[in-house]
Each structure stands twice: as C-alpha cells, then as structure tokens.
Amino acid sequence: MLEPKVWQLTAGSAVLGLVLAAGAVALAGPWDSGQRKAERDWAAAQGRTGGAHHPGGHPGKPAPAPSAAGVFDELAPPVESLSAPADLPAGLRKTLGPLLESPDLGPAPAASVVDVATGEQLFGERVDRPMAPASTIKIATAVAALSALGPDHRIGTTVVTADDKAKGADKGDDKGDDKGGDEGDSEGDDKGKGDDPTEITLVGGGDATLDRKRLRALAEDTARALRDRGVHEVAVRFDISLYSGPREHPIGPNDNIAPVTALMNGQGRLDDSARDSFGGPAPRSGDPAGDAADAFADLLRERGLKTSGPPAMRKAPKDADRLAVTYSRPVSALVERMLTNSDNDIAESLVRQTAIKAGRPASFAGAQQAVQAELKEQKLPVGGALLRDGSGLNRHDRITSGLLTALLARAADPDRPELRPVLTGLPVAGFSGTLQGRYTDADAITGSGMIRAKTGTLTGVNSLAGTVVGPGGRLLAFAFLAEKAPGPDTAQRALDHLSAELTS
C-alpha cells in the first residue's frame, strides 16, 4: 500500500503548480502522442530540475540547474495545518460516482483517488483492473528510469578510433615502420600506410535528444582531436549495437515515433520540427542512425576533414580510444520533457537505459522485464501490469489505476527526492504541455492551473493521471482509465470534469 510520508507537498503543491504554470504558458502548445493531438513546442522545463554532473565529471558538460526539491521544502506548511474533512471519501463517492458513469467514458472505466499523505483510498472503481493506459504508462517509465539510473545520469554519444595514427601511438622499432614511423614522419612509409584514411566510429549511446547543435559540437571536438594527431582524412563508421531486437515499434511506421535505435539526430524528423525543438508527430526517417552518421560526416567535411566514402555501420573495436563525447541533459530533465510533451522517443530511450543498467538486453522485451522488475523491487503493486513499451503506443500495454496512483504517491515521497521530476514534469492544466488546451469548459475550469496530470490517448482509449490539492489542503493522486470511449474529445472533457471535481 502507499506510504504516509508526503505531508510536505500538500498546500505547497498548489502554489508551486501556479508558479510553474505561469512560466510554462509562453513555452507550451498542445499535443498528445500515439494517434493524438500535436504539441509543437518544447514545453518541458529544460533545466528546472537536474542535479550534479554524472559521476566522473566530463569537461564541457552543461552545468545542472537547481533541483526542485528545495522549492517544495520552502513552500511546505506545518503538518498540523493540513486536515482533510472526515467526510471526504463519502463526498467523492457522491460527486465522482455519477460522473464516472458517463457514456463518454465507455462501459467500464477505472478510477483511483488516494490521499498521498496517508495512503488512504478515497475513491475507487475497478482499481485493480488492468487496462490500456496509453501515454499514462510514461509515469511508470519515469519512475523506473529515475530509480534505476538516478536523476543525474547523462547519456553519452561518443566518437572513437582504434587507428594507431589517430591514437598517436608509438609502437616502437620492434613493430616495424609500417605503422607510421617515428618522429612524426607518417608520410610515405614503405607500405604507403600514411595515405590510408583513419577509421573513426560514431557510437550511439541511446540519446533520443541528440540534435543538430550538439552533433555539430561533437564534430568540432572530433575534428580538433584529429588535427592534433595530424589526421586529415577519415573513414566514418557508426555503431548502434547497444540496442538489440526489432527497431520498429509494433505499431509500424508512424509519425509519432522513429525507429528505435541507439543513434539518431533530431529524432529522425524530416520536417522543421527538429530544427528548434521536438514535440508532436512528424514525418520520420526509416534510417535515423544512417542519417545521423551522414550528417556527422558532412559536419566533419565542413571542418576541413576529408572523408573516404559514405559512413558504414560497424561495431567499434573493443580497444578504441575516445576522441570526443557529447552528453544529454540529466535523466531528471529528460523525464520532465518526456512527460510534459508526451515524447515517445525519449520514453523508449529511457526504458532501454533502465534495461542496460539492469544488465538486460536493450530491446522491447528486455526493457519490459527491466521496468517491471524495478517497480516490483520498489514494492509497487505491479500485479496485472504488462509494460510492452515505454511510450504507451502499444495497445497491448496494461496497467491499473491503483498502480498509477501508487507511482505518483511514491514520486511525492519526501524520502525519494530523486523521483520528484515525475511530479514537476506533469503538464499543468490549461497552461502547459498536453494539457495546454484543456480545462476550458465551465464544468472543468476550476481545475485550470490546479491540476498536474499525464494524458493518454489512443483510438478508443483515454486516460488521465496526476495530482491535485483537494479539500483541506491535502495532496491527492488520481488516475482515470477509459476504454471503448466513443470519441476522444468527449472522453477528454469527461476526464477533465472528473479531475476538476477533486479541487472542491
């Protein structure tokens, strides 16, 4: 069951939600992934939470932003000032029960509302029934990734070489002069090796946020390292062996997700949405790794290096030396961006990083095993859960409303500050991310600015899970799951109405 440890977040959450919502207005635009509405802007707070560098510090990595944990501590009221009305459960049954019976939510929707501070189930219908979660599954993805990897972990993309010329190694006379010679005289040796291009490999680490700007910086660092070694011509290779299994999501080619590979640039987007920010559906490349390698080779040529032929896919040698590296933002920021924008590519990247940490294959199957094992280890109610992907695009995914509220409550636990980005990444009703254009109807307007929630939409599937400060100033976690809904717009309005009732 849920732990009664979260009184620090209660009334403070309301203020924080309004503060963050105001800042998000200028950044956000609506979308939801899958067969979903488009959000074009990168509404996630790009550095709102973060932390220290990944262990082992690397020069040139961006400085982290302050963690959100201190904000919650500042806003927390005394626990004795927070007292939920004794009749709250009965009141919720009276108000939510009839709304849950709306035909707009299909024949048998599920619902769970818990008091985060006490773990008390205030309202529930079919709480333990596994249902298709759509994108609300990203809450499970976020908790598993943060728990397994830590909020400060960064995903690297590297360039390596095993070529002696680029490594600058002096093999000595006993190895013969055919490796390049002494005293820097690498031209015109008796076997002509000085004329051979140096082989370098672009190694994908699974960073779904690698963009043109960072790829350009990586090329600049690589070119500088090669020039320092007297190398002016290279053969470019690329390595995507970190991931295994099918690259294409089971839904098939789709504008909402690129083929899942360990290397991509701009999420394989073929339109202008990759130029400034990611978000929303877009035409996708069938070979994002090859395209990223081509772009990298072009950038090297812009920096004066000659390339020998087109890039070829090849696993990097085990004894390769690193020439250059670029790192993603911390996992805490990736989680926020994934949740706010409902970013499917980041979601699939994070579950594979979780699998790698657990020593499992970085595949759809390996990620499913790793995430479910991580949640089970956290003693969360995973019975009936089936997490076939990290994004929720798979219609065979199953999750319970009880698990969703348990995940949210765990993220609010003051003893688990590393999970806080799960809450800070949730869109703010009426202001940011996938909720920017919602909560406008008269029966839901009270939720605007007060509710933070993850949306989920597939054909016939609608879901909503998040947090709200309810009566008495208590922080409530809620989850509503609907299948066989007659239409997405009416189902979303019904979900908005349900959650808005929790504010009064």
Image (cartoon, helix red, strand yellow):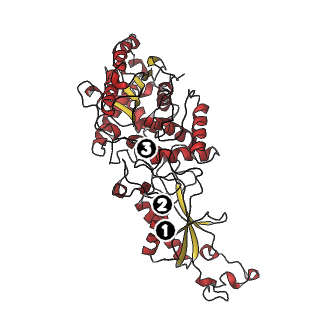
Toward which corner of the image does residue 96 lie, by quadrant?
A: top left
Q: Is residue 351 left or right of residue 8?
A: right
Dot 1 and dot 2 residues touching (CB under 8 Å): yes
Q: Position of residue 208 (x, y in %)?
A: 47, 52
Whether residue 419 is situated above or below residue 92 in the rendered picture? below
Q: Earlier in the sequence, mark 3 or mark 2?
A: 2
What amino acid is found at the position of numbered circle 3 in the picture? Met
Q: Which residue is mark 2?
A: 60
Q: Is residue 339 left or right of residue 239?
A: left
Residue 302 visible to an observer of this rendering: yes
Q: Residue at x 25, y 28 (%)?
A: 445
Q: Position of residue 14 (x, y in %)?
A: 34, 29
In-front residue for pair 361/484 = 484
Q: Which residue is mark 1?
A: 221
Q: Given this view, does label 3 or label 1 mark the residue nearer the observer?
A: 3
Q: Secondary structure at mark 1?
A: helix
Residue 338: image tag: 3
Q: Position of residue 310 (x, y in %)?
A: 51, 72
What amino acid is found at the position of numbered circle 1 in the picture? Asp
Residue 51 visible to an observer of this rendering: no
How many other residues sit within 10 Å of disc 3, few (<14), some (14-19) or many (≥20)?
many
Q: Position of residue 281 (x, y in %)?
A: 37, 48
In-front residue for pair 227/283 = 283
Q: Residue at x 32, y 40 (%)?
A: 432
Q: Earlier in the sequence, mark 1 or mark 2?
A: 2
How many other residues sit within 10 Å of disc 2, few (<14), some (14-19) or many (≥20)?
few
Q: Residue at x 40, y 61 (%)?
A: 213
Q: Earlier in the sequence, mark 3 or mark 1?
A: 1
In-front residue for pair 244/338 = 244
What amino acid is found at the position of numbered circle 2 in the picture? Gly
Tell me the quadrant of the picture where the N terminus can be found: top right
